[in-house]
Image (cartoon, helix red, strand yellow):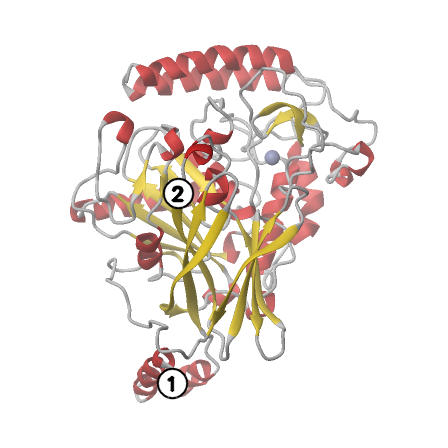
Amino acid sequence: MEAVGYAAVNRKALLLFLFLPLATMARLASAAPHTMRLDYYHTGNASEERFSLDRVVLEPLEWPGQPERALDDTNLGKYFFEVVDRKTNRVLYSRGFASIYGEWETTGEAKEIHRTFHESLRFPAPPDPVQIVLKKRDAKNAFREIWTALVEPKGMFVDPSPPESPGPLLAIQKSGEPSEKVDFLILGDGYTVSERSKFEKDARRLAEILFSYVPFKERRADFNVWGLCPPSAESGISRPSTGIHRRSRVGATYDAFGSERYVLTFENRAFREVASFAPYEFVEILTNTRTYGGGGIFGLYSTVAADSLWSPYVFVHEFGHHFAGLADEYYTSDVAYEPAAGRVEPWEWNVTALLDPAQLKWKDLVAPGTPIPTPWPKEAFEKQAKEIQARRRKIRAENRPEEEMDALFKEQRVLETKLLATGPHAGRVGAFEGAMYEARGYFRPQVDCVMFTRDEVPFCAVCRRALARVMDLYAGGSGSHGSSAKPSAVKSASSPKTAAAEPSRAVTAPTQSAKESARSE
Ligand SMILES: [Zn+2]
């Protein structure tokens, strides 16, 4: 069968040529390929999983990535996929990522029932048949192949038809061609037609917040920021724990995995169809809601409740998960939790199991003489956190007004900011025990960080370096600092106030059960 997709695209291109100036024609002649998307179902339970093909589509827009950075050498993500040319066996494109399934399989529910999640892999449309190879980390964190699918890009079932338009594309910040920039899409959900101007205001406000944080601040020109807001019939999104159900266009909902503040959409097809109208590599979904909440999954999307008092903090924190696979540095439980025998080093760059202190993965950022592990007021912190958590659960259990939660978080922020500033190694890089939902056995790089509390602090030096390295993968060409951002990272590590415009942030306190609340704060 001849290329259904390509034929349609080429015809359109020919028509365009008739009306375009020469320079534009030259650019089109060497135009980037379109974005191809493979949709599939990921089904299983805690002990087995299965993949099945849904369909292959040609998205409406060109591939927004840098052709010369097609291969992902960051070693981030629980999963990794490769696009392999059938004829030459050459890897044309690869990326690491994480998924909702990957989190769900570690919850209690996965021990009880099977579930299915819809997922997508996006890559530049290849000219010839390719093999898609999907890998997942094993118990020792080594990637193993778990699924493969053949894609015939010129096959008749490759669907090039555009989905329903989500409305006009908003250019919040255009710094250059998508292929040369990080393309960040802010997607509104739960906004009605008449609330579109509110979405624009929310999106611009939160984008400014992100760019007030190092390293986004000095790399701002490496980003394009786009906005899309498909109108919802009703204002707001679903919150099943309080009986609220909405058919919003992107499908975002509170109570993901039963965690009241965890906001995700499980409607991947709807999400992808809306997003395909923007050039994008990263997405944050703004929900038109007031109740505290959010979520972030590496390479998928992040979410935030736009009207929460804490939206500036949550927006940035969740983007850290989504953009660079940063782990939560927080933990709630003060119960002794001994490291499991055979615990492996996490793949995330900002946490360590410290199996070999001499090989600490961020040791180049540690000042000589800093003890490893690094002492900090851990017991006092846990005592405070435990008390705050109990009050937090009570507020939600009794469905108290959101103002009460805001007041509690403010109180917590004051307490924790003060306490964390007192330790002998405050502001320095070391290995501080307590991270990734566990009080024992995981360590974070600094005593405080955007990934640890809602305190008014910057990303720690290790998180800053991780974020800059991912920026290099998408916008390495212009004014990149990349891993050479190290010196400035260390310097600003000791100044706790990075973001002048930083509004309120409160404390942490993660939550009930670790895995179930994963990534939700
Ligand atoms: Zn950090």
Which residue is labeled 1 in the image? Answer: 2
Query: Which element is circle 2 on?
Result: strand
In the image, residue 447 sits, relative to residue 283, either above or below, namely above
Q: Which circle, 2 or 1, is nearer the viewer?
A: 2
Where's residue 131, x and y in %? 54, 69
Seen from the viewer's position, the closer of residues 242 and 33 is 242
Q: Residue at x 43, y 68 (%)?
A: 36
In the image, residue 424 sits, relative to residue 31, either above or below, namely above
Query: Left or right of 292: which side holds 415?
Result: right
Query: Left or right of 29: which side holds 239?
Result: left
Q: Which mark is residue 115?
A: 2
Query: Left or right of 272: which side holds 86?
Result: right
Three-letter code for the amino acid on which mark 1 is drawn:
Glu
Where's residue 315, x and y in %? 43, 38
Q: Residue at x 73, y 29 (%)?
A: 430
> Looking at the rendering, in which quadrant would you find the N terminus?
bottom left
Query: Which element is circle 1 on?
Result: loop
Q: Residue at x 57, y 48 (%)?
A: 77
Three-letter code for the amino acid on which mark 2 is drawn:
Arg
Q: Residue at x 67, y 29 (%)?
A: 443
Ligand 1 falls in which quarter? top right
